[in-house]
Image: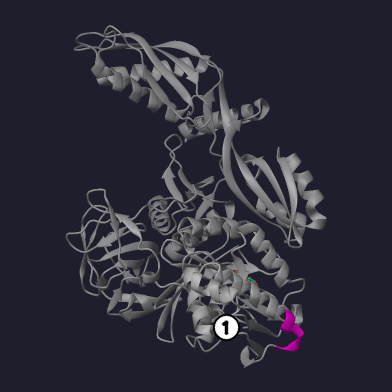
Amino acid sequence: MNDPAKIRNVALVGHRGTGKTSLFEGLLFKAGVTNRLGHVADGTTVSDWDDDEKRRQLSLSAALAHVERGGLTFNFIDTPGDSSFLADAIASVHVVETALMVVNAVLGVEVQTERLWARAAERGLARLFFCNMLDRERADFDVAVAALQEAFGQQVVAVHLPIGREHELSGVVDLLAMKAYTYTDGKAEAGDVPAEVADAAAAARDKLVDAVASTNDDLAEKYLMEEEIGEAELKQAFADAVAGGQIYPVAAGSATHLIGVDLLLELLALAPSPSAVPAPVAVGADGADVVLESDAEAPVAAFVFKTLADPFSGHINVFRVFQGTVAGDSTVVVTRDGHKERLGQLLKPQGKETKPVDALVAGDIGAVAKLKDVVTGDALCAEGESITFPAIEFPAPLMSFAVSAKSKGDEDKVMQALRRLAEEDPMLDVHRDAQTGETIVAGMSQVHVEVIVERMKRRFGVEVDLKPPRVPYRETVRGTAKAQGKHKKQTGGRGQFADTWMEISPQPRGEGFAFVDKIVGGAIPRNFIPAVEKGVRAAMSEGFLAGYPVVDVQVKLYDGKHHPVDSSDMAFQIAGSIGFKAAAEKAQPVLLEPIMNVEITVPEENVGDVIGDLNSRRGRVLGTTPRGHSNVVAAEVPLAEMLTYAPDLTSMTGGRGDYTMEFLRYEEVPAHIAQKVIDDAKKEREEAQKG
Ligand SMILES: Nc1nc2c(ncn2[C@@H]2O[C@H](COP(=O)(O)OP(=O)(O)O)[C@@H](O)[C@H]2O)c(=O)[nH]1
Ligand SMILES: [Mg+2]
């Protein structure tokens, strides 16, 4: 493969459980890459090959596979749809031209459908839908398409139409060619459009041609004049409109029954190649924009979007080439710090297997093992070049757990394993708590952190205990107060002296910290003022109520004293810290807690229970809207009340509920609850000091 125009990079994205992994399996099977169709329930799919994924029947990380067909190379990426494991889905939309959005024909648009759509839209990707599970009870293609149109606009248009419904689903009409495909055991027979769907197909075809024609002047004219529009001409205009994001076609079928899957593969040949979309823009050495032409001859620029940390085979970095040709056994420069890396054998992943290749051309996606120091987000460039890719924005971790090694003496091994796993998962944060000295693992949910704990055990052979989750509280003040911060020490030789007066006052929520220097007449010499600010910031990071960082305050330094010999940076830092604590204590300190935006999808009969339960969690229910055959309850709830929501929702709904949660803002913790948090923190600190 050496022609970017022959590549199709397609990420399968969508809400959890819409059938992405099954569709990926079907696509590989239909393309002849595999000779047996695996199933999610049996743990036999190409994509969910990891033990964690098999056990949970849930994709946790992206899987890649490639298909050669009709002179084209398709690079498919199956991504996780669960909100805790979205990192790879978010990264994947940065390396493809096309997002294949898989939706459940019964439920229609779900929470992550919208989130991932927004990500794909930000990147300007071509977007196609696969309306899956049309064989299921209560699946309705027309209702699903209408829901997609309502959510994503009138450019959403059917390109396929199902024949038969629910368990009688028997085939699909290709509206571009006006041909019908009926299936027996996943094998298609092509024929004329059957009479039972003839009218519906004609109407749907009209809508499709209308939508395509509205993006193409030549076609629009022919359409108006009611002239014949040739299939090749229609397909070309269709492909252009898809590439330009002017239409979002909806294909139809069933992944597990292999209905419409071969047709989808054909349709994806019309998706844009890397050279059919506007060239991506990166940043050059001088900070100026660099346009990355998908040109095989240009200097190499590649982007690492995924890293696998395996204790045995070492690191594997997965990257997309944006410019030039990456050759095996060549040398590249890592822009982050300019160090060189010698690339060994290049690979194309095929599920958990890999296939060796000699080179990867602009537009292609591949992997390389055993690099010394390359992490996700790195740019690999030709020597002499220095290109940086804009950083991918991942949501911040929501829940922190302290972990401790099960066996004494394993502490370093735990930290090492966690560091490796954090390299693999950009939505995981690992650090040591400055106050308690504990190792903190912060992730998106309890399940997320539990998966990390399992991986540590299985891959690195270390076991840990998880303490209950922590809420990232913050501290602030409601009032204004002044205080003195004085540091004076007389030892044998030179003494220490610094004296400060400051005023602390609240800032609007989310404004952060401001330091205002109001010193006049040299009461504190200019060169010591940054030291005071440093001392204030140090005190802020330690908090004064329960040890949480202080936010949204203004500190005004307005007076002080110095000594010509005994004053120093260190003395003013200490005085700054003392002054800040003294002022904060007098300024009505309060505790803040994160409030989450929560959306819960539940069957009608559980709506009442779920709302009642939310009220008992200090939640504010915003409303309930029907979605497909379910209901979505929207609410704002303190994170502290949602720490163990997953099992509770499962028991309330018999496993039929689902929810997503996102940080919204910080709010004051009600006084009676705040007191408990403060008391607990105090106890914990005392214990940490003892032990
Ligand atoms: N009836 C039916 N079940 C499907 C279909 N596609 C997927 N499934 C099932 O739906 C569940 C979730 O599928 P999976 O591929 O893991 O979804 P993902 O989370 O989007 O990757 C699995 O049990 C699949 O067997 C389909 O077209 N029809
Ligand atoms: Mg999956």
Picture layout, residue 73 above or below residue 560: below
- The picture places residue 421, in percent across and down from the top left corner, at 42, 58
What scheme was used to colour the molecule? one colour
Q: What span is colored magenta in the figure?
A: 194-199
Residue at the spot x=44%, y=65% of the render? Answer: 459
Please indicate whether residue 32 sits to the left or right of residue 635 in the image: left
Q: Main secondary structure of the magenta part?
A: helix
- The picture places residue 10, in percent across and down from the top left corner, at 47, 71
Task: Choose top left, top right, bottom left or bottom right for residue 192.
Answer: bottom right
Task: Choose top left, top right, bottom left or bottom right for residue 18.
Answer: bottom right
- For badge 1, the amino acid type reads Glu
The residue identified by callout 1 is: 228
Dot 1 crowding, Cα within 10 Å, few <14, some 14–19, many 20+: few
Residue 54 seen anywhere in this rendered image of the structure:
no
Residue at the spot x=31%, y=69% of the render? Answer: 294
- The picture places residue 183, in percent across and down from the top left corner, at 66, 89
